[in-house]
Image (cartoon, rainbow, N blue to C red):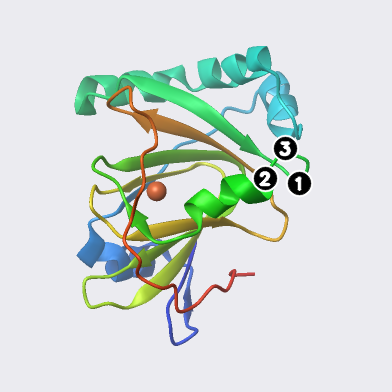
Amino acid sequence: MAKLQVEDGKVYTEVEEITRELAPLHIQIHRWAIADDPQLRQLLAKDNLDEDEKQQVLKAFDGYFEQLKQTAGYQFCDLIVLHPHTPNLDALLAKFDKIHTHDDDEVRYIVAGEAVFGFVRPDGSQVELTVQPEEYINVPAGTEHWFVLTPARRVKAVRYFTGTEGWVPKYTGTPIRRHQVVA
Ligand SMILES: [Fe+2]
């Protein structure tokens, strides 16, 4: 279940409240179920997945990808797997934890673990949203945001792309005022 922390420390957990707080950003959050398939659950519980295992996971969520292909022109997806023993994890995370935008929407579907998206709202206020399994999030192009892991440092997320260029950040230089992880 997503949680949203705003700058005065208030934490929202109700979908209606989170939707209201994020409304100025036009962020979409949906709940996409993960099938209760023992083999899939086993893969999702593993820290490290080889290429073949990643493909098996992606195949399990192919129905959602088809939907995005047909309704929103998505063409590619991959599975990002991060855990405490991921090689160069800190260097990798350092690319995500500065405020940036993209020319395309950033679309993620969390399938295991959790992570935090920070956003700069149009009034300049900064909020942090913890996303968890079964949560699909669409961050519109041009939205100032950042991404960090929670202390468990584990997440698996499907990334959906409309083009072949993949993940391209444009750093805006806006400082992050808060960097707290919602417990
Ligand atoms: Fe991003």
Can residue 154 be seen at all in this image of the molecule? Answer: no
Q: Label 3: which residue?
A: 87
Q: Quadrant of residue 81?
A: top right
Question: Mark 3: few, some, or many residues within 10 Å (few <14, many ≥20)?
Answer: few
User: SS of the residue at dot 2?
Assistant: helix
The x, y position of residue 26, in whole percent, is: 22, 56
Tag 3 and tag 2, C-beta contact below 8 Å: yes
Amino acid type at mark 2: Leu
Cα distance in 3D space between marks 3 and 1: 9 Å
Cα distance in 3D space between marks 1 and 2: 7 Å
Amino acid type at mark 3: Pro
Q: Label 1: which residue?
A: 84
The x, y position of residue 117, in whole percent, is: 46, 58
Q: Label 2: which residue?
A: 89
* Relative depth, front residue between 2 and 35: 2
The x, y position of residue 114, in whole percent, is: 60, 51
Please name the residue shown 50% across and 58% down the image: 97
Nearest to the eye among marks 3 and 1: give it. Answer: 3
Nearest to the eye among marks 1 and 2: give it. Answer: 2
Amino acid type at mark 1: Pro
Please name the residue shown 47% across and 82% down the image: 10
Question: Mark 2: few, some, or many residues within 10 Å (few <14, many ≥20)?
Answer: few
Image quarter hosting the C terminus: bottom right
The x, y position of residue 71, in whole percent, is: 21, 26
Dot 1 or dot 2, earlier in sequence: 1
